[in-house]
Image (tube, rainbow, N blue to C red):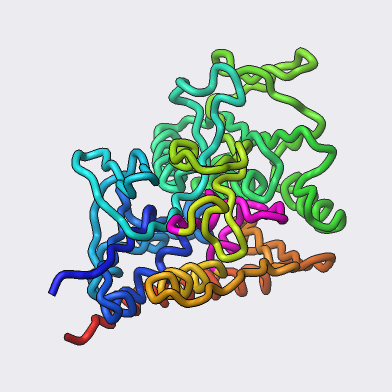
Amino acid sequence: MSAAHTVVLVGAGHAHLYVAAHAETFIERNARLVLVDPDKFWYSGLATGMLGGMYEFTTDQVDPRALIEAHGGEFIQDRVETVDTCTRRLCLAGGGDLIYDYVSINVGSRVNVDAIPGAAHDPSVWSVKPISNLWTLREHLEARFRAGETPRVAVVGGGPTGSEVAANLSALATRHAIDPRVTLVTQSDRLIVQAPAGAARALRRNLTRRGVVIRTHTHIVRREGKSLSTEDGRRIDADVVVMAIGLEANSLVHEMGLPIHPKEGLRIKATLHSIADERVFAGGDCAALEGFDLPKLGVFGVRQATYIHANLLASLEGKPLAEYQPQKRYLAILNLGDGTALSTWGPFWWNGRSSMWLKDLIDRRFLEDYRHHVGTRRKC
């Protein structure tokens, strides 16, 4: 018997892993569930630790094909180029198209490399997205370390990601008995401005003690040769540049013809569907929840997962949709690469080895849960 409806998941992001792991709930309702993604899922929680040498790339991945097929769904290894909401048609980069009844977008964010003139086409400039870049960067740096080189690395962006990247670049060099030559640059007057001031001071002390040079109040205006030019005319020497600024929603949402916030993403209601199209859902970094200014952190996509799953099922059955309310406080833990981590929860913060133990436990459990779902196949 052919399926009565087709539900397509675009992107194997945090939210869609959960839906894929419950594909049988769609089959039970005579619906076809299809996940489209060009790659494996790379988990942001372990990404900087992977860069710093704490984890291998296999530890940071989940196979979305194995996950959804284990539960009766379908996987297409491809990239969606356009979404035509009038005809409900998805155009695939590899050719062909896919008709949907309901679609959910979970394609994450990208770094606006064009924010710094001269950076976009420079092979020595790396962005923190996609996450696979961090593994490739580690391989690149390790090859240079083995060749006896000590490249100067500049990280642009003093938020949580930039700070973690700088800390773990220092850790990677130390693992190879190389003196770290890392500079962390931010326009702000301090690091991690959304965190408590005490946490920011503790972070700065940690990085400075390990040889990371921190430059606040510094606006980068151009990448030229082997240096970065600042707005006030200074130059920062950098053989390698890592960009951790300007996170924006994936460009796909800009091509859909639906209301968007230019940087934050597709505008969605509390029911997690587009404000203009009840057949288009979205979550994570590519979505902008009306009435909220959420940071682009995986904790929100993870919590949205159960709502996207429930509301897709409710839509198939014509039932009322549940409303998602983002948590007011959330636990954020930065891996500092030296065996310690910095935790924040609202106005509270603490750092040390216990924080790193907690982060490692949470992240490994998240991934192991989905690997368990791969091993627990749907019974016919």
Comparing 144 with 377, the one in front is 377
Q: Is residue 328 left or right of residue 105?
A: right
Question: Camera-side residue: 9 or 213?
Answer: 9
Quadrant housing the N terminus? bottom left
Q: How many marks?
A: 0
Horizontal and vertical percent position of residue 75: 24, 60
Instruction: Tell me which residue sits at (46%, 45%) in the image.
Output: 134
Relative to 217, is 359 above or below?
below
Position of residue 206 measured from the top left corner of the image (x, y, whole percent): 74, 52
User: Which residue in the rendered view is the most extreme toward the left?
Assistant: 1
Left or right for 178, reference 355 = left
Q: Which residues are magenta?
A: 279-302
Residue 349 relative to residue 133: left or right: right
Q: Quadrant for residue 68, please give it.
A: bottom left
Q: Is residue 274 visible?
A: yes
Residue 8, placed above or below residue 257: below
Looking at this view, name the residue that lies furthest to the bottom. Answer: 379
| Viewer can see residue 180 | no
- Residue at image position (60%, 36%) is 262
- Residue 106 in the image: above or below residue 17: above
Residue in the image at 66% along x and 54% along y: 290
Q: Quadrant of the C terminus?
A: bottom left
Q: Answer with left or right where residue 207 lies relative to residue 112.
A: right
Residue 109: image x %, image y %?
52, 45
Inspect the magenta stretch and tell me whether residue 166 lies in it.
no
- The residue nearer to you, when weighing 327 against 44, is 327
As drawn, 10 above or below 342: above
Q: Position of residue 203 (x, y in %)?
A: 76, 53
Query: Residue sitting at 51 percent across and 43 percent down?
Result: 258
